[in-house]
Image (cartoon, rainbow, N blue to C red):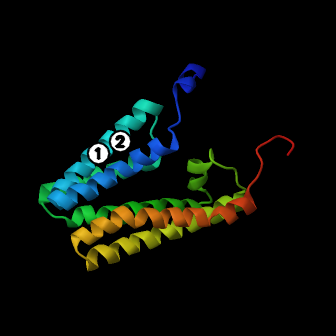
Amino acid sequence: MTTPAKAAERTELGPLLKFALDLGPLILFFLANAYYKIFVATGVFMAATIVSLVVTYALTRRIAVMPLVTAGVVMIFGGLTLWLHDEVFIKLKPTIIYASFAAVLLGGLAIGRSFLALVLDSLFQLSEEGWRKLTLRWGIFFIAMAILNEIIWRSVSTDTWVAFKTFGFLPITIAFALAQAPLISRHAVSDKPGA
């Protein structure tokens, strides 16, 4: 149970710092690949991911589930990449992450739960139907992203894949998230009593 003193210790990250901590490891991955190629870049990515988590925890006293899961997959697949000296493993990492998120979200819907509501409930309040529709959309989106990653890494050079991973996936995700605004607006509910 969180005491008032513990709750007071927790702080929220500013949007720019949060963006830097989320995107920093990816930018370092891109730069390291440009100068030292994929195996050094993978090691840099793994180290930067851990540093990002540690800094986030030091500043907020908590780590969200998605970055933690992502870091776990980075460590496993990055470790396999370095240990076996096979870049396929790091290229599979986005596919595994996207497919895992899709499985959790769509699996939750299959049993009547919106796990997206558990993650995003602090940002906005939606009706049950709204959470169901938003969860379905994100589940399908993650499947599409997993397929897209598979197509790209299997059909282009490693350098091109790294560039797309860095500068392609994020804009696509932001555009998709912004496209959900009408659905969120339609299904928003007030959390104020009597409203």
Residue drawn where x is 83% and y is 40% of the image: 193
The location of residue 105, given as percent across then percent down, is: 53, 60
Q: 10 Å neighbourhood of mark 2: few (<14), some, or many (≥20)?
A: many
For the residue pair 121 and 113, the one nearer the viewer reads as: 121
Image spot of residue 95 (x, y percent): 36, 66
Quickly name the residue at label 1.
48
Rendered view: 8 above or below 25: above
Circle 1 crowding by C-alpha within 10 Å: few under 14, some 14–19, many from 20? many
Q: Which quadrant holds the N terminus?
A: top right
> Is 12 on the left or on the right of 49, as rendered?
right
Which residue is labeled 2 in the image?
52
Q: Nearer the viewer, residue 179 or 132?
A: 179
Check whether the beta carbons of the residues at disc 2 and disc 1 lie within 8 A of each other. Answer: yes
Residue under the point 37% across and 35% down:
55
Q: Secondary structure at mark 2?
A: helix
Secondary structure found at label 1: helix
* Quarter location, residue 122: top right
Q: Taking 166 as reference, is 86 left or right?
A: left
Residue at x 19%, y 64% (from the top left corner): 87
